[in-house]
Image: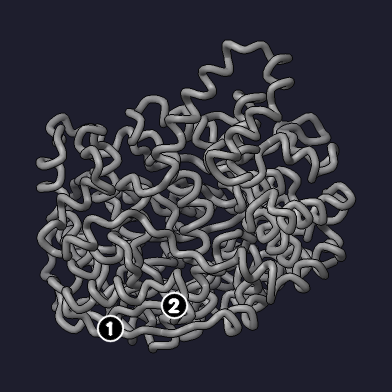
Amino acid sequence: MYVIGCSGQAQPSRPHRRSSNSVCGICGVAFTSRNTEAEARVRTMTAALRHRGPDEEGFLLSEPRAPGLALGMRRLSIIDLAGGHQPIWNETKDVAVVFNGELYGYRELRERLILCGHRFTTQSDTEVLVHAWEEWGEDALNELRGMFAFALLDLRERYATAPLLFLARDPLGIKPLYYTQTPYGFAFASEVRALLAAGAAPKNLSRDALTSYLLFGSVSEPVTLVEGVFSLPPGHRMLLHVPERRRVPRARQWWDLAVSPAARDTRKPRDLVSAAKKLRPMLEDAVKAHLIADVPVGLFLSSGLDSGAIAALAAKAQAGIQTFTLTFPRTDFDEAKAAGVIAKHCGTKHTEVPLDGRAIVERIDEAISALDQPTMDAVNTYFVSWAARKVGLKVALSGLGGDELFAGYPTFADTPRLSRFIRTSWFVPAVARRLTEPLVAALAGKRGSPDAGSKAAAAWVSPDVLPHPYFFARALFPPGRLEKLIKPRFRPSTVGPDGVTLEPTWLGWLQRAADEARKMEPIGGISWLETRNYMASTLLRDADSVSMAQSLEVRVPLLDTPLAEFVCALPDAARRRPGVHKALLVEAIRDLLPQEILAQRKRTFTLPWEVWLRGSLKKRLETSFANPAPRLAPALRPGGMQGVWNDFLAGKTTWSRPWSLYVLNEWCRRHLAA
């Protein structure tokens, strides 16, 4: 992390607990109208966020120095249970903050600020934010280590005529923050649904986001499925002078991997063994920091290497670690045996939570209702979070991020093959590519799934329609397939009816990620694309949404900022070993896990959707497709969803396509109802 100096007299620090604050939900408005309307809107949004923080609520209302501005929060108490009430002010009552997340290593930062002359009245990490802002302004972001999204109000004399509202989000996007510009001002919240509940945005479907969803099975940063509502992208911040609340604020990047301390380090390891040796203490430090809490902390334990590594490191750092595994007795996809081996080896307090198909099917509607935005993957995570709460946990560690950092996905092999394939296509005339499209699809389909054939055909015919071969590898419905689903007038456009470029779009986000990836070596580039696309727009969003729906905090130690920066900055030679899956991680924790766990290939946790969609869920999907949601129906070609369903029943496509359409349709029906 960057070190910024300060001036001022040192003050003795008071003893303090091993505490930070809590994860929660935040919201706020900066309106041109009366305070009473701002207060009403914020109270409505805060009520809509209650599941994120059932323990406490807090407000900043009717502040005479910032008329029309109101802030709200909900708190899930994890640490410093009796303190950390929000909003938190500085000692002179002119800087306030509402904060969602956890800051790790904040105690050291607190001590530095005390030496700079700042006075603290609580033991919470949230209070560190207001004093760090006083001391360093926007540069304070470079000092923060953790998962966070916050809104800070500055009423000091320099902003006397224009109070400043500052919003920021953590580097990798672990915690969400959404915003919208309305006719009456600016509004933000931790969830899209809170903005909808308060009437801050009309319940209209974004055609830009619809295309993104169908391409990837989730909506890419920085758009949302609701027209006019945007996500503040990972590693971005936003400034708004309250009197200028009619002017749309711009999101600006504050974190950049290319200029991170790890990227600029000229002494970074160049080989696997050296890199693993340096990685090990970083893993230990990250896990230890993520264990701090005043409530029980557990661990999602699958049969995989990522959660196994965290279990081993956690057990080494702290006695009595709780682990739990969602089990499916007498099925091929049950992970109980391997997870049990890891738990026994590490000496954790292990619990198996059995779940059968009937129980899952009965709770499908509940799982979809928990989604802040639709996604094809989230139901799996929902039931893991449900299991954590069932065993009494408020905090759970996850191995999320391991596949992205340590090259665990098939995309790390598929993308280079697609790159070579696309380079070949450029030597073939466009007419010939179109004529040979069916042959390419058939050949690729024989070597993989039917969906692999359509992806290869799309890359063959239109290799430049997506900004990087990786995006073809990750595609759900390839670009050519979208034409059979979406009506022409609902296809994405980056220009609005007034001729002004819409701000922002998901394709621009992907293009920037692709441009950065091309500057890196192959593994590093794909790793970067995974963190900016699938991880940010699907996995992290899902983990936050469905865990918070059950008042559970999920922590991701493998995405600790210094650790992630270090791994992402490594050359490929320091991240791979022929024939060894996740070679860097294996080398770093070789002495902590049994060889049978270290040597296994990746096994993706997924439910038997293929079977269920042909059995217990079949009637449910058929009913849904026969009745498209009112907001979705005008965007789709007649019979488009039914055609995908028929292809699935005929074995021409996999379960993920009809399932993603079902989730989309039901989400629109629930949340975009007129």
Secondary structure at numbered mark 2: loop
Q: Is residue 592 visible?
A: yes
Q: Is residue 510 left or right of residue 274?
A: right
Q: Is residue 117 visible?
A: no
Above or below: residue 430 compared with residue 36: above
Q: Residue at x 18, y 66 (%)?
A: 313
- The x, y position of residue 499, in whole percent, is 79, 29
Neighbourhood count class around disc 1 (C-alpha, 10 Å): few under 14, some 14–19, many 20 upward = many
Amino acid bearing label 1: His
Q: Is residue 422 left or right of residue 416?
A: right
In the picture, residue 556 is in which quadrant? bottom left
Above or below: residue 574 compared with residue 276: above
Neighbourhood count class around disc 2 (C-alpha, 10 Å): few under 14, some 14–19, many 20 upward = many
Q: Residue at x 19, y 46 (%)?
A: 3
In the picture, residue 77 is in which quadrant? bottom left
- The x, y position of residue 398, in whole percent, is 35, 66
- The x, y position of residue 482, in whole percent, is 74, 41
Q: Earlier in the sequence, mark 2 or mark 1?
A: 1
Above or below: residue 86 compared with residue 377: below
Amino acid bearing label 2: Leu
Q: Which residue is mark 2?
A: 552
In the picture, residue 396 is in which quadrant? bottom left
Closer to viewer: mark 2 or mark 1: 1
Above or below: residue 243 compared with residue 524: below
- The x, y position of residue 621, in whole percent, is 75, 67
Q: Is residue 255 left or right of residue 5?
A: right
Q: Which residue is mark 1?
A: 350
